[in-house]
Image (cartoon, grey):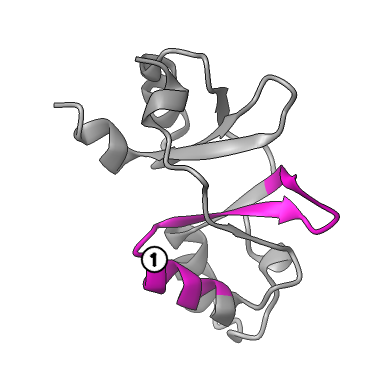
Amino acid sequence: MDCGQLASTPPLTTTPNETLERAIEKMARHDVGVLIVVDPDNPKKPIGVLSERDVVRTIAGKAPLTVTVDKVATTYPLIAVYRDQPVRDAAEKMRVHNVRHVIVLEKNGDLYGVISIRDLLKLF
């Protein structure tokens, strides 16, 4: 199985200028643990991720919920795979980088989807 077959599509996205509060509401409403941060001028270009871990660190640091996503999201390095790579490559990236999500890209770098640890567990 390749990453494109397992990826959740389309992925939920946010922009750097969205408030943390709105992003958290979106995550809760859709029951997801990550939003892909995309370039506001090109919604197919991922520039970061906003994960539950980012949210917890931000709140623990006493930042207001009005802070914008660009101040709290993880932007570098992006942990990604291409949609035609085997799923085991996504699992290995999660293990090596200690993350629960990987971005799935088209060969041209456009955003395709996201694979979560939950997606991987469904395979067993």
Residue 59 horizontal/vertical position (percent): 50, 77
x and y percent of residue 97 in the render?
A: 47, 32
In percent of width and height, residue 95 lies at: 37, 27
Question: Disc 1 marks which amino acid?
Answer: His
Residue at the outermost right position: 41
Residue 14 counted in the magenta span: no
Residue closest to the eye, 17 or 6 = 6
In this image, 55 relative to 107: left or right?
Answer: left
Instruction: Magenta stretch: give its range.
Output: 23-47
Name the element at disc 1. Answer: helix
Q: Residue at x 40, y 57 (%)?
A: 33
Answer left or right for 15 relative to 104.
right
Residue at 28%, 31% (x, y): give it.
120
Q: Residue at x 55, y 83 (%)?
A: 62
Magenta region includes residue 37: yes
Residue 57 visible at all = yes
Residue 37 position, x and y percent, is 66, 54
Tell me the residue that label 1 is attached to.
Answer: 30
